[in-house]
Image: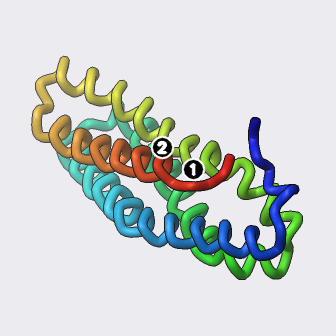
Amino acid sequence: MTDTGASLTPSQSREAAQQVATMCRGLHVPSAAMGALVDALVSRSAADGLTAAAADLDRIRTACARLHALIEQFTDAPHLARGQPELWLAARAHLRHDLRTPLNAVKGYGDMLVDDWRDEGQDAAVGELQRVLAVADQLLVLIDAAPLGA
């Protein structure tokens, strides 16, 4: 059964908001690092003439930005829980899914590019992209371990 938060007392809601904020603070650094790795990869791929990958790299970059924005938003979860409790409870119910969605995009497009670049002998680009994917995996583990109640 999924806990939407509707049965939480105000105290429990504040505690849940604090847990979400703590989790998001823990996601902030790896999320920012992943974005920086992607930015460097975009620059490298352009310099190396890997123009066929530009659209997929842009999708990965967009997914990283979406993830980071969501993390930033929920770092202030206690304020959201106090100011708009109904909105907070609804958002909390879907937070794990919302955090995983951009990471799944990073992994999906990243895996396709790894395959393409391996076939093309682009070992350095593959190595950089694998670092991005390793951070995405790390973030997924942190999200799955978080006590979100949903």
The answer to which of 54 and 2 lies nearer the viewer is: 2
Location of residue 51 (image quadrant): top left
Left or right: residue 123 versus residue 101 is left
Q: Measuring 49% from the left and 36% from the top, which residue is drawn there?
A: 104
x and y, in percent, of residue 123 in the image: 11, 33
Location of residue 89 (image quadrant): bottom right
Q: Which mark is residue 61?
A: none
Give, as a three-letter code, the residue at label 1. Leu
* Dots 1, 2 in contact, CB < 8 A: yes
Residue bearing mark 1: 99
Callout 2 secondary element: helix
Left or right: residue 83 versus residue 36 is right
Residue bearing mark 2: 103
Give, as a three-letter code, the residue at label 2. Leu
The answer to which of 63 and 148 lies nearer the viewer is: 148
x and y, in percent, of residue 29 in the image: 36, 68
Vertical arrangement, residue 5 with respect to residue 100, above or below: below
Q: CA distance from mark 1 to mark 2?
A: 7 Å
Q: Measuring 61% from the left and 74% from the top, which residue is drawn there?
A: 18
**Numbered circles on residues, count:** 2
